[in-house]
Image (cartoon, rainbow, N blue to C red):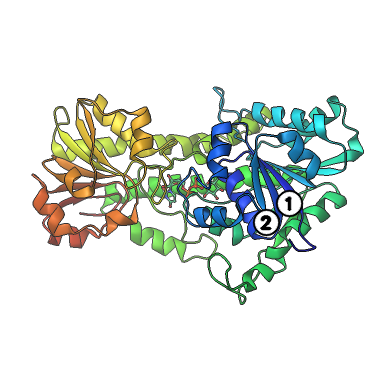
């Protein structure tokens, strides 16, 4: 390790924690990654990443049991580290708030072993004021106030491109009210902000020494906490907005793709996150929109705009069911082929997946389903086991065999590359209802399909 190497602990080895841990090792730091799940720690020690993520297996095998160690021993990790990143889950509670009991438990455990100045870093998505609660928990557990600082360093990585996002971020946000803590964080990120990482020939994503290094933005801790929630809520709003526009396009025979393109070329709007579909899902947007709304409520701020965002997102699924019903006249007794279970393409994650929710809705309508996903089938089977109304296929073509309609519910690249002639010849009725606009309507018509998509004329 180089002289600028910093010893870091990462608590929690989920998506954010594990990716941060291997990326810190890739940036030249020493990392202890802690999880209280012994099975998980054993798997990670043997090089099993447990999640489907590009670059993660190779980085893990490069650094595992060397620059990065996995353990269940939080006390040891606390004693040995200059900075402790808390990256445990903050799930949604029944009231919509973020459940912070895991964060609190970690703070109390850190307090028991803290003997020298350490920076505690919130990496999990947390509501504003969490840094103050963490400080209070440490002090209540006997830690002198000058022995620690709590900073907020939110993470903006997306599943599927998590490692590349971490190492090539648009910005790095550090919310800190202490110059001493800010310096530690600046040191940790200096390989990225100073640009040296991008000059390495083995840099993930390729050497790109010409690219501008990411800006390091210092804010107050509260601002940083709000930046994370506000960013996710804004992206969700963008999606609900384009979904509402797509509905208007359907009602007027306009084309939402042309509309989104025309809007997105305005640099103030931007082209990204304007893809209409069956609504956003995943472990972040639904939870974070609800938590942000709840924070606003608690502060007496009217943010009912977010309630509308959620409403449009839910309606997008019922609209899709209606669309399939219109295509098939009635739903009861129909057999539907489903392509896609994951909440988006290129991941095996099914948390809050609109695809899974839609399958449940179609089964409730009396349909039977045959479903296929390139990576998420076994996870889906754990919550929706195969039965008389639901079976799982091994590939897209066998999913399409003898169904009344084929539904596309996840934007996997693999689906966009399907051989249309072969698909058509497999199907009893060549009806495709595409919830992700993966195909060109003209090409689908030319290949003999009745093709229905989102916000575009047939
Ligand atoms: C999201 C954010 O994009 C990340 O910046 C953030 O760090 C992360 O949440 C988090 O808070 O941890 P992620 O949930 O991995 O990342 O997935 P996205 O790529 O943002 O997609 C979220 C959902 O929106 C998916 O269901 C996707 O299909 C949908 N989506 C996305 C659309 O329907 N239309 C779009 O144009 C974009």
Label 1 neighbour load within 10 Å: few <14, some 14-19, many 20+: many
Is residue 100 depicted above or below 194 in this figure?
Answer: above
Q: Residue at x 28, y 54 (%)?
A: 415
Residue 326 makes an appearance in the image: yes
Residue positioned 73% across, 63% down in the render: 190
Q: Residue at x 46, y 52 (%)?
A: 160
Q: Of residues 123 and 79, which is closer to you in this image?
A: 79
Q: Which residue is mark 2?
A: 172
CB contact under 8 Å: marks 1 and 2: yes
Q: Position of residue 281 (x, y in %)?
A: 44, 40
In the rendered image, is residue 254 in sight? no
Q: CA distance from mark 1 to mark 2?
A: 7 Å
* Mark 2 surroundings: few (<14), some (14-19) or many (≥20) residues within 10 A: many
Residue 174: assigned label:
1
- Kindly give the residue lying farthest to the bottom in the view shown: 210
Q: Secondary structure at mark 1?
A: strand
């Amino acid at each position: 390790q180089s002289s600028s190497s910093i010893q870091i602990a990462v608590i929690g080895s989920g998506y954010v924690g594990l990716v941060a841990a291997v990326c810190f090792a890739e940036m030249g730091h020493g990392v202890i990654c802690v999880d209280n799940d012994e099975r998980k720690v054993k798997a990670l020690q043997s090089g099993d990443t447990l999640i489907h993520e590009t670059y993660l297996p190779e980085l893990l095998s490069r650094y595992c049991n060397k620059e990065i160690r996995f353990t269940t021993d939080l006390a040891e990790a606390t004693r040995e580290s200059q900075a402790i990143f808390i990256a445990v889950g903050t799930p949604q509670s029944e009231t919509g708030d973020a459940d912070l009991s895991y964060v609190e438990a970690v703070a109390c455990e850190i307090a028991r072993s803290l003997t020298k100045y350490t920076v505690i870093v919130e990496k999990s998505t947390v509501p504003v004021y969490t840094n103050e609660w963490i400080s209070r928990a440490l002090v209540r557990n006997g830690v002198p106030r000058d022995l620690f600082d709590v900073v907020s360093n939110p993470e903006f990585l997306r599943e599927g491109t998590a490692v590349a996002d971490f190492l090539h971020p648009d910005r790095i946000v550090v919310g800190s009210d202490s110059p001493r803590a800010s310096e530690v964080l600046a040191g940790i990120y200096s390989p990225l902000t100073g640009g040296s990482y991008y000059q390495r020939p083995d840099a993930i994503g390729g050497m790109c020494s010409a690219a501008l290094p990411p800006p390091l933005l210092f804010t107050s801790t509260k601002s940083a906490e709000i930046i994370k929630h506000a960013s996710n809520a804004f992206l969700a709003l963008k999606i609900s907005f384009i979904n509402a526009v797509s509905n208007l396009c359907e009602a007027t025979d306009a084309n939402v793709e042309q509309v989104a393109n025309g809007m997105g070329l305005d640099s103030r709007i931007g082209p990204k996150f304007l893809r209409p579909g069956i609504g956003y899902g995943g472990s972040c947007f639904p939870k974070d929109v609800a938590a942000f709304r709840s924070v606003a409520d608690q502060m007496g701020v009217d943010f009912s705009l977010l309630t509308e965002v959620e409403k449009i997102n839910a309606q997008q699924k019922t609209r899709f069911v209606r669309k399939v019903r219109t295509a098939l006249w009635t739903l009861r007794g129909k057999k539907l082929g489903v392509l896609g279970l994951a909440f988006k393409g290129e991941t095996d994650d099914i948390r809050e997946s609109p695809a899974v929710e839609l399958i449940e809705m179609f089964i409730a309508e009396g349909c039977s389903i045959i479903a296929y996903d390139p990576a998420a089938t076994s996870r889906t089977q754990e919550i929706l086991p195969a039965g008389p109304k639901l079976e799982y296929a091994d590939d897209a073509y066998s999913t399409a065999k003898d169904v009344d309609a084929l539904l596309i519910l996840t934007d996997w690249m693999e689906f966009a590359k399907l051989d249309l002639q072969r698909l058509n010849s497999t199907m009893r009725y060549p009806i495709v209802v595409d919830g992700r606009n993966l195909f060109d309507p003209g090409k689908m018509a030319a290949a003999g399909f009745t093709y229905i998509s989102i916000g575009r004329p047939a």
